Image (spheres, rainbow, N blue to C red):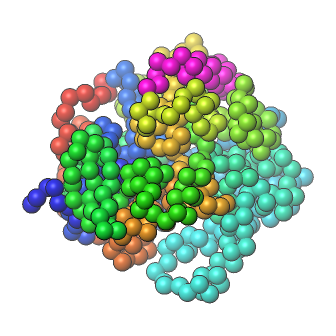
Amino acid sequence: MDRDEWDAIVVGSGIGGLVCAGYLAAEGRRVLVLEQHDVAGGNSHVFRRRRAYEFDVGVHYLGDCGPDGVLPAILSGLGLGGRVSFREMDQDGFDRIALPDLTVDVPTGWDRYAKRLSEALPEDAEGILLFTDVCAAIADETRSLMLSQDDLSVADLMARTPVTARWGRRTVSELFDHCGLSPRARTVLAAQSPNYGMGARQAVVSMHAAVTDHYLRGAYYPEGGGQVLAASLVEALEAHGGELRTRSRVGRILVEDGRAAGVEMRDGEVLRAPLVISNADYRRTVLDLVGEEHFGRRLVAKTRQAEMALPFATLYIALDRELPARPNANLWWYRNDDIEAAFQDLADERVDEVPLLFFSFASLKDPGARNVCPPGHSNFQVMTLCPPGYEFWGVNEGPAAGERYRRNAGYQDRKAQLTEAMLRAAEEAIGPFREHIVHLEAATPISHERYTLATGGTPYGLAHWGGVGGRPDTATTVEGLYVVGASTRYGSGITGAAVGGMACAGQITGRRLLAEVHAGAVLGDPALLPPRAADWDPLAVSRGAGRRGARGLARIG
């Protein structure tokens, strides 16, 4: 077989790209995945330090991973059932929301969630029940539609989604107003909104409802860490004849006579395929990799003017002691009880004091895992949203454009200031811990962009694309060119990206793949999957077969 000719080339190896590639390979197509980073996985990848600690970059918790879950169904459809295990978090309180003088533990289930919030905020109980009723109805309508095997007319679609038709494309802030909610109630209801990187005035109700429903169906953590997800998908891809090449950056997506024709690598190598699926940043795909000359003026204008979701700064922390006893729950900590004011401060770059923090306690979620930390130690991440754009960081173009930023004094000063502010706030939230730190590392949106090439370093893709709630589908106006990832209309996060990957593969193959696998279909062949030795390393697997034994892989122990 000529390895310069492929049936499909996937640019980027985030979860959406790997899912799409896996299903195309399982169908019998020759699929090549190209990844510029050292390992596959995008925002699901991990990194290791001091041969003792492994930190998740983006997988902090997953929703809907029970017997009826969407993500387990997607994995099982490739023959991966049983190869990824999900640990339950505390289902009576998987997220703890902490405001001044108020703490609320978020349980699973819409009814329990609404009841608990109403009891915590009795003066807002009526509005909370109305808000949660609308969101629960939208979540139920959209999930039912997503898993349906029916071809629906527009009239049938509207009839089956009446609440979504009324509220789905309106902003969360509009629904807050409609429900007459106080700032404190709005803060509690939107406390988890950093899960999609937008405030209530930007996010649409359908997105908020889908993300909230995702976790209310049960909160989980993948046993072994986020890299297990990517490694398992790589195994499925390779088992069905596909190939992953890491450290392989695409310079151009080729379009000839109005259709996709393959890619040109940064080193000039040309690889041909009639199908190209870009899991790269959407703006970079349209404006740089493909080129705006191949799209209509309106789409180019929307893409140029698009706003990105907010990015994160993250502290990766290891302690030489265990954390004080606490539930197996994330912590959402807010300095005050007006979340909309906090998001406005971010937009205005008023961040002298950190307005909010998200804590993910990896050593509680995967206890005893040798990759997380040594016995008696702790591993956790502290995250906060950052203002959009490069100016806040003293950077001009960003690392994706080739800017060398790490010796930039302004960047280093800002990073040090924010690190100190986050540490101060973190100790306000959970008590003193600095004297026990044995590893501390800060990551900014700029460093995130360096590894993922995502515009502005956000893991959440587009916030606005041609209007409130607007996002592109996976099919494009260029024949044979598709897009997957955080910016598509199927949503961000691990499961949103995976669903988008399924939708893309389904559009290419003409099948309702998600409905098929959720009903129990297994399209991949489990017998083709490789055995896993006792020292199986998901990070090594995620480098691809061609680089699996290459030097430079960080190890634990």
Residue 460 percent across, percent down from the top left: 54, 48
Give the main secondary structure, helix, strand or loop, of the magenta stretch.
helix
Q: Toward the viewer: 451 or 101?
A: 451
Residue at screen point 40% across, 27% down: 53
**Which residue: 38% across, 55% down?**
290
Q: Nearer the viewer, residue 68 or 349?
A: 349
Position in image of residue 137 (x %, y %): 68, 70
Whether residue 151 is visible: yes
Taking 37 as reference, is 553 above or below it? above
* Quadrant of the image occupied by residue 352: top right
Residue 234 appears at what percent x and percent y?
Answer: 28, 51
Closest to the observer: 314 or 30?
Answer: 30
Note whether residue 210 is visible. no
* Outermost left residue: 1
In this view, 39 is above or below 318: below
Magenta stretch, residue numbers: 404-433
Q: Residue 23 occupies which quadrant of the picture? A: bottom left
The furthest residue to the right: 123
Q: Position of residue 232 (x, y in %)?
A: 31, 51
Q: Would you say residue 430 sits in the magenta stretch? A: yes
Which quadrant of the figure contains the N terminus?
A: bottom left
- Determine if the magenta segment contains residue 129: no
Q: Quadrant of residue 366?
A: top left
